Image (cartoon, grey):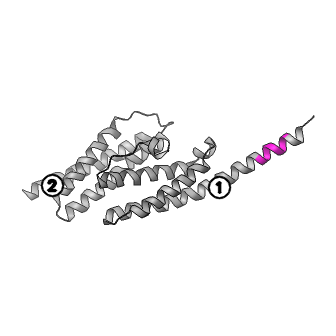
Amino acid sequence: MKNLTESVSAATSELSELESRRESAIACSRRIIRQTKVVIHGIHTGSDVTGEMERLNGQMSDMLDLCRDPLILCSGPVQDAMGEYAEAVILNAVMSGDSIPSHDELRIPASAWILGLADCEGELRRVVMTRLMDGDLEGARDVFSELESIHEQVMLLDVPDAVAPVRRKQDIARGIMDKTRSDMTTASIMHR
């Protein structure tokens, strides 16, 4: 058996490198998830999150550099981080009045982007509720309008769970929208 030892050694070396990049990507994914929480909290408190977004974008770029192999790109922690990243970026865009960047612009898979978009509905509900509690009915209506637009698109998705677990997100989004619509109706009636 010629070259068996060399072939095994080369394969082992390649797998070792893959494992190292995977571990680094998982560590990056944890940092990204922590940073998305900082960004989202900052948005809810009305802070300027420009610097935090730059940090988040840098962390995502670092992780994507480690994800050249589909095995790493498709790992659970990496996918979770990309979904959280999409949620934070989309929320920031909506609250800043900017257009929502596509998954291609964010350099993440469509499935992670879609899940982040669906999760953004819960954060937008929180903004609506905060504005209602502050007595800002007009501001709540503006955010609610954005929430409705996103909700319409999320509910139109028909994707097999094997591709992206969208159905569960749609069920959650439906509940969020029903509660928010009810709260908006009550606030509008009380305002009159």
Q: Which residue is drawn at 46% across and 34% down?
A: 160
- As measured in the structure, the alpha-carbon distance from the residue carrying label 1 to the one carrying label 2 is 50 Å
Horizontal and vertical percent position of residue 75:
59, 47
Please give left or right for residue 98 compared with residue 166 in the image.
left
Can you say whether 7 is above or below 37 in the image?
Answer: above
- Amino acid at pointer 1: Glu
Q: Name the residue under label 2.
A: 186
Q: Nearer the viewer, mark 1 or mark 2?
A: 1
Q: Residue at x 88, y 38 (%)?
A: 4
Residue range in magenta is: 7-13
Element marked by disc 1? helix
Please give left or right for residue 74 compared with residue 51 in the image.
right
Frontmost residue, 181 versus 82 = 82
Horizontal and vertical percent position of residue 50:
39, 61
- Amino acid at pointer 2: Thr
**Label 1: few (<14), some (14–19) or many (≥20) C-alpha neighbours in 10 Å:** some
Q: Mark 1 points at which residue?
A: 23
Q: Residue at x 38, y 35 (%)?
A: 157
* Residue 8 is one of the magenta-drawn residues: yes
